[in-house]
Amino acid sequence: MNNNRRNFLRKIGGSAAALAVGSGIQAQDQQPIIEMSSKLKVAATDKIRIGLIGAGIIGHFDSDTALKVPGVEIVAACDLYQGRLDYAKEKWGNGLFTTRDYREILNRKDIDAVLICTPDNWHQRIAIDSLNAGKHVYCEKPMVQKIEQGHGIIEAQKKSKKVFQVGSQRASALAILEANKVLKSGAIGELTYIQAFCDRTDIRGAWHYSIPTDASPETVDFDRFLGDAPKVPFDAKRFFRWRNYKDYGTGAAGDLIVHLLTSIHVITGSMGPSTIFSLADLKLWKDGRDAYDMVNALMNYKEAKEHNAFQVSTRVNLTDGEGKGGFGLKVIGTEGVINVGWNDLSVKSLKRHAAPGYGGYDSYESFSAKQKEEFKKWYASEYGDDMGGYDYVREIKFDSPKGYDDRLDHMINFFNGVRTGSAIVEDASFGLRASAPSIACNLSTELGKPIQWDPINMKLI
Ligand SMILES: NC(=O)c1ccc[n+]([C@@H]2O[C@H](COP(=O)([O-])OP(=O)(O)OC[C@H]3O[C@@H](n4cnc5c(N)ncnc54)[C@H](O)[C@@H]3O)[C@@H](O)[C@H]2O)c1
């Protein structure tokens, strides 16, 4: 970081960021970059012992992140592919307990919490069993595969009084928390519209994950993986690329729009949309999959005490030929915009002139010469020399410290909840309020009509 930039930095403490926009947001010519930093701390008092259920791609990200939280130890891993159990021992030592049956993890008294990182079709069952077994639960997103599975988890959590957090880490991301403060400050006027997308170009981004050469009915417990899904003969593609099939995943909407809605719900404080309309299709990756690779959805958020009415336009395009890819989230108000990046954001505010101006693309140009002269005189007497338009009055950028990891803050939030009972933002109700409208995108496409959702009572209408 160069010195010039360093001079502009003002450290802001995470979610308590002192953004008194209006007075605090700085003039454009200063071009400040405000560095956000996490205020989350954790005391490594007693040990928390975790078991990982589903030791695939994200299971490792989540476990490695959990192990960065002081006092957390991993003692067990469950998976249905032998190679992943072998790797878990290679990585975490031969003392690690491994099994293909997650109930053996739940039966262990020395395990306080589980990370559920299985395909979507197993989330609900394992979450409820884990809560009933007295374990705290970090459950990957989307919380459920089917909308009607949500209330079972909410009830089980209430009954068990254990901590339950969904693993959509954007709920704890500094940029998202900061965007919430900016919006509340009024810096962009009245919220009207949010645009949120996730695009990918390459084939691995479209879930074409590597299949190990030793995949077989002996190394993979395929029948257990199927769970309640229709019985089919062993198929390594279905097992290792489960997202491509509706029977096990939730498609592009459940996989990725859920992250976008999670962010939107934290930024706006909203409980969710009331109407969801979606068009989805399988455009490019016709490799036997039945999940869509492109989804475009519109959602209507009714006025609530937390926000005025606004609309959301969201998409996932796994066939993106532009090659840029990535996430985009733009919160647009009547007087500005918040552009939210992964770890940064920028805010631009404008003020419109009260005077309308004239000329250019305007009826004035079609007036006769005489009328033009008369109109000019009239305008000057009415508005002086104000020729209308708008001015950008503020621009500010926020950045997270280099190496900032929202997943780590999300884990710290979870383990703080386990240790101290502190509030969990992404609890089971939040999880259902983000996953149900995402899954409703698939429903809307299939039924060819908008889906009506009651975000307060969390029910399809
Ligand atoms: N928060 C995030 O950023 C993020 C990112 C990727 C994935 N995810 C979510 O994490 C979950 C896992 O995704 P992934 O990409 O790691 O998948 P993956 O296929 O790489 O791993 C899933 C693992 O679960 C195991 N499994 C399947 N059924 C099981 C069962 N009944 N008991 C125990 N293990 C079982 C499989 O053997 C597999 O190894 C999905 O729900 C996905 O949506 C979240």
Image: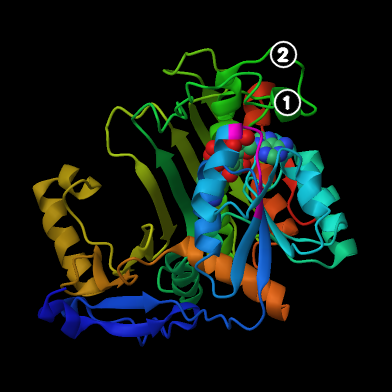
How many C-alpha atoms fall within 10 Å of the one at disc 2: few (<14), some, or many (≥20)? Answer: few
In this rendering, the answer to whether 161 lies above or below 261 is below
Please give left or right for residue 114 compared with residue 183 in the image.
right
Q: How many marks?
A: 2
Instruction: Find residue 276 and report its horizontal and vertical position in percent.
Output: 63, 39
Nearest the viewer among 425 and 273 is: 425
Which residue sits at x=43%, y=41%? 198
* First to last magenta residue range: 76-82
- The scheme the figure's colours follow is rainbow
In this rendering, the answer to whether 126 lies above or below 305 is above
Q: Which residue is mark 2?
A: 232
Which residue, as the protein is rendered here, is positioned at the far front?
94
Which residue sits at x=43%, y=43%? 197
Q: Is residue 402 visible?
A: yes
Task: Find out whether the residues at labels 2 and 1 contact each other: C-beta distance under 8 Å.
Answer: yes
Q: Which residue is mark 1?
A: 226
Instruction: Find residue 328 and report its horizontal and vertical position in percent.
Output: 38, 49
How many C-alpha atoms fall within 10 Å of the one at disc 1: few (<14), some, or many (≥20)? Answer: some
Identified by mark 2, the residue type is: Val
Please give left or right for residue 264 compared with residue 285 in the image.
right
